[in-house]
Amino acid sequence: MPYELKPFDVDVETTPYLEDASASATATSGGDRWTLNFGPQHPATHTTLRLVLQLDGERVVRATPHIGYLHSGFEKLAETLDYNQYVTIVSRMNYISPISNDICWHHVVEKLFDIDLTPRCKVVRTILAELGRIQDHLLCIGAAALDLGAFTGFLYGFNERERIYDIMDYIAGQRFHPDYTRVGGTMQELPDQAQFQRLVKLFINEQLPPAINDIETLLNKNRIFRERTEQVGAISHDEAIAWSLSGPIARASGVKRDLRKDEPYLCYADNWDGQGAEAVSFKVPIATTGDCLARYLVRLEEVKQSRAIIAQLIDNLPGGPMNADDDAKVHKPDKMSVYGSIEGLIQHFELVMTNRKWTCPVAEVYGANETANGELGFYIVADGGPVPWRAKCRPPSFINYAVFPRLMEGHLLADVPAILGSLNVIAAELDR
């Protein structure tokens, strides 16, 4: 039976507690209702999130999220950084799977410049995108278990993420923020293709499967975990669409949408190599109950599907260049060209040291990728200069977090960590 909400005796928008949050819990004028500040330093929020909860006993009758504790100005910074430099900003928007943000940003920029990537670059980016998805889901699954008391489940997921960091470190020289992509390609060729393949295959074949098996064994039939997640924070198919939800949260409610299938790009599209190659084969997991347990199971299955995608590609890396044809001179030439030819030296100088850079179209463009948390999109307005005139981001966490008050109403205070963890909110995506 759904919990019946009693009428409020006070106007929550004008009560003093919204302005004065110094006390952790203060009584409202109704006597039975209590206002509780949850965060922004509470460990269960994972980051700088603040929730103002109105409680009737231990029952939450209203939840008011507050953002603004992590202003980064990432959209404004796009107006002062060129199309390559800005990759260092987008990777910090979602610091759980930063490589996915890198790939999405340059996917949109290449759409603006009408650049077709080489087959080799498409395969490498697809592999890295799926590693980012695994990276993100492992932390979400592990933290969801941790919030409900299963510390061991967190270790199962978190330990294997370190292997992905090792791969990112190998190809880019940075573990946490690889910033590996560039307009038309990547920052550099793979240091050693055979070693890259060995690291990836070791991860997907030997290191990841036991971790997934341990997580499933620990949680899937665990009575405590299921009782804390089943029928908790449920949202219907139609409501998920009305709230513009995307990613695992929407698919857990039966919404059959995945940009890799609906608007395919990279190796998710047919003929990605220009010679008739078929798109990678994978299934999109769909659930119907729309609760915390469904969101957990969808993410778990997506990890398995990502592993299958990588397995199809890792042994078949195409040869040829990593970067696209350089008629437009949009990326840095290789070092031998810089050292050995005046054209390469001038191109490198213009891209790095001057504001001439490249000639950009005067146009507007929107593009999006299916990242771990849903549809990540960028809208770019270009005026022909070396930097965007305006850039707007559609971060999945910002959209998904809006539904939290709806999910929380009528549940117990103890359900806050379960529901919040199932949304996998990244605070850096919330603030403009």
Image: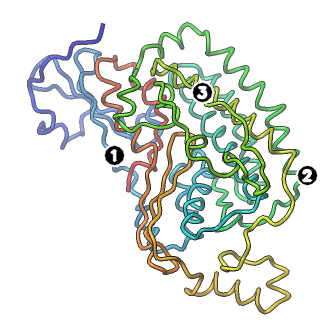
Residue type (three-letter) at the residue carrying disc 3: Pro
User: Mark 3 or 2, which is nearer the eye?
Assistant: 3
- Report the residue marked by disc 2: 194
SS state under label 1:
loop
The foreground one among 203 and 325 is: 325
- Pointer 1 local density, CA inside 10 Å: few below 14, some 14–19, many at least 20: some
Q: Position of residue 79 (x, y in %)?
A: 44, 72
Quadrant of image for the C terminus: bottom left
Whether residues under marks 2 and 1 lie with C-beta atoms below 8 angstroms apart, the answer is: no
Quarter of the image for residue 113 reads bottom right
Q: Position of residue 45 (x, y in %)?
A: 43, 35
- Report the residue marked by disc 3: 285
Residue type (three-letter) at the residue carrying disc 1: Ile
User: Mark 2 or 1, which is nearer the eye?
Assistant: 2
Quadrant of image for the N terminus: top left
Per the rendering, the mark at residue 67 is 1
Query: Which sits earlier in the primary sequence, circle 3 or circle 2?
Result: 2
Whether residues under marks 3 and 2 lie with C-beta atoms below 8 angstroms apart, the answer is: no
Q: Residue at x 69, y 27 (%)?
A: 156
User: Mark 3 or 1, which is nearer the eye?
Assistant: 3
